[in-house]
Amino acid sequence: MFRIPEIPASAGAIILDDEGRLLILKPTYKSGWTVPGGIMEDDGETPWDACRREVREETGLEVTHGRLVCVDTRPAKKGEKLGLRFLFHCGVVSADQAKQIRLQEYEIREHRWAGIDEALELLRPAIRRRVKKGLKTKSCLYLEGGKRVDGVSR
């Protein structure tokens, strides 16, 4: 009998300030740094809706535009399913908007605006690979485990 797979999916955001620094967050529930974003809800939420909701919940920022820069698969691990990760480039926020950040304290310990090299060094490895590629591309990339796949065009 054929089963329809249930695949967990999440959406994240690349957000820059007017100095070209990346917004990174330090979650309370896992190690390392990440970008704003999180799991899509199972009520029919789209990746873009999830991205905007998560950014709003975690930072208080309202993103109104974005460009899908990559769709990545998180490889299945023992006891976990393969997951889909959507990453949107949401552009630049002004200095005034950056001052309006209000963290969701029970999920986010701290935030910072980091230069790209510093941010990439601080981000967790899978997110680092996605963000690095997402910052460079003008189109949407398909990745597996944060890496390009032979045979899949740009």
Image: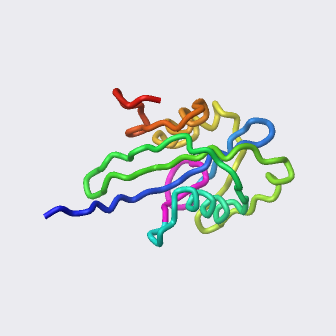
Residue sitting nearer the eye, 109 or 13: 13
Q: Position of residue 151 (x, y in %)?
A: 34, 27
Tell me, yes or no, whether the highlighted magenta stretch contains residue 38.
yes
| 141 is higher (above) or lower (below) than 10 | above
Left or right, 103 with reference to 144: right
Tell me, yes or no, whether the highlighted magenta stretch contains residue 119.
no
Residue sitting nearer the eye, 76 or 105: 76
**Residue at 52% from the left image edge and 38% from the top image edge:** 140
| 144 is higher (above) or lower (below) than 9 | above
Q: The N terminus is located in which quarter?
A: bottom left
**Residue at 52% from the left image edge and 54% from the top image edge:** 11
Residue lying furthest left in this view?
1
Question: Which residues lie in the magenta part?
Answer: 27-40
Left or right, 45 with reference to 2: right
Residue sitting nearer the eye, 89 or 99: 89
| 121 is higher (above) or lower (below) than 92 | above
Q: Position of residue 39 (x, y in %)?
A: 49, 61
* Main SS of residues in magenta: loop
Q: Total marks drawn?
A: 0
Left or right, 139 with reference to 80: right
The quadrant where residue 144 appears? top left
Q: Position of residue 75 (x, y in %)?
A: 33, 46
Q: Position of residue 8 (x, y in %)?
A: 39, 59
**Residue at 57% from the left image edge and 56% from the top image edge:** 48
The quadrant where residue 115 appears? top right
Left or right, 73 with reference to 89: left
